[in-house]
Amino acid sequence: MKPLIVKLGGSVITDKGKPFTVRRGVIKRLARELKGIKSPLIIVHGGGSFGHPLASRYKITGGYREKTQLIGVSLTHRAMEKLNSYLVEALQGEGIPAMAVQPSACLIASDGRIESMQLEPVRKMLALGLVPVLYGDVVFDAKKGVSIISGDQLVSYLARKLSVSRVVFGVDVDGVYTACPKKDNRAELLRVITPADVDLVSSLEKGDQGDVTGGMRAKVLELLELARLGIEAEIVNAAKPNVLREALQGKSGLGTVITGGK
Ligand code: ADP
């Protein structure tokens, strides 16, 4: 059976408004929803209020320039490890054999994009029935010294390199809208996005101040790359009970489908 990739957005598993705050109840519920999934799973999560504030404070996305950033590299990574540990323990609590995979220890980036990644351990984990849990991380970069690889970019890379059946992104809104639904009450939900909608996607918000990975626009651009290769993705509201589970069980149309077809 081909694996599914599920991305748990930082907006869902943390409170983006409060530094270093996990949404304990939501994580527990999501772990219960994931428990019922029969397909092999790869889980990737974002940084939310753990990764972004530190990465932003130490200007990690701009690359390595001075020694004072090194403590920032160390702290950003550790913050992501803490969030990851919390999630892995919640999954284990439901009996899911989850295991952390540290992106910074197995990939090299170049100018903020993944250049190479050692995927054999992930393949072996899947073959055994373990559930790899990866996350957006501060990584080593051939051009910039260090950079941030978002969970979104990891999903897109993994989906291209491993043969996956479907990609589901859980965020805290019902999908992709014509504008940020939290700021514009006239924003309309887009049910389907295809590569033909690239102009519309380019006009989406790059993320709030402090978001170091490009917000909804970067997310959709990553998924359009997959759509061009024939890998369909859906962005759904994981803050609503059972939506993520149903999407992973194959129900389509719960949020925004990003597909290559018409
Ligand atoms: P995550 O951290 O969960 O991966 P992001 O915070 O990067 O997700 O993106 C989700 C957030 O993007 C939503 O909480 C919403 O406030 C914001 N957003 C901005 N523009 C849009 C849009 N056009 N459609 C949907 N959400 C949007």
Image: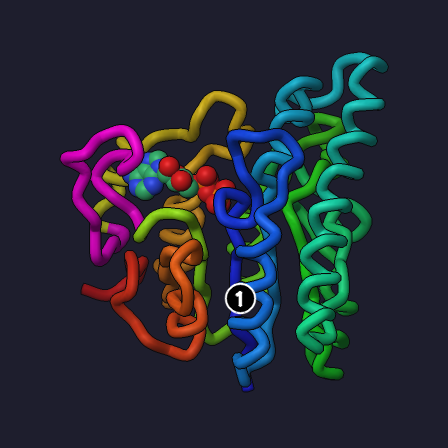
From the viewer's side, name the closer residue of 89 and 130.
89
| Range of residues picked out in magenta | 175-195
Q: Which residue is drawn at the image coordinates 71% and 42% (left, top)? A: 80
Examine the structure image and report whether residue 192 is included in the region drawn in magenta.
yes
Helix, strand or loop at label 1? It is strand
In percent of width and height, residue 185 lies at 18, 34
Say left or right for 124 vs 205.
right
In the picture, the quarter occupied by the C terminus is bottom left
In percent of width and height, residue 71 lies at 84, 23
In percent of width and height, residue 154 lies at 59, 52
In the picture, the quarter occupied by the N terminus is bottom right
Q: Amino acid at mark 1?
A: Ile
Examine the structure image and report whether residue 81 is included in the region drawn in magenta.
no
Residue 91 occupies quadrant:
bottom right
Q: Which residue is drawn at the image coordinates 17% and 44% (left, top)? A: 188
Query: Does residue 167 lie above or below 123 as drawn?
Result: above
Say left or right for 12 vs 221.
right
Return the residue at label 1.
Answer: 5
Work out which residue is located at the far front of the displayed protein and give it: 25
Q: Which residue is drawn at the image coordinates 59% and 79% (left, top)? A: 40
Query: Does residue 41 lie above or below 207 as drawn?
Result: below
Residue 140 occupies quadrant:
top right
**Ligand 1 is in which quadrant of the figure?**
top left
From the viewer's side, name the closer residue of 237 and 226.
237
In percent of width and height, residue 59 lies at 66, 19
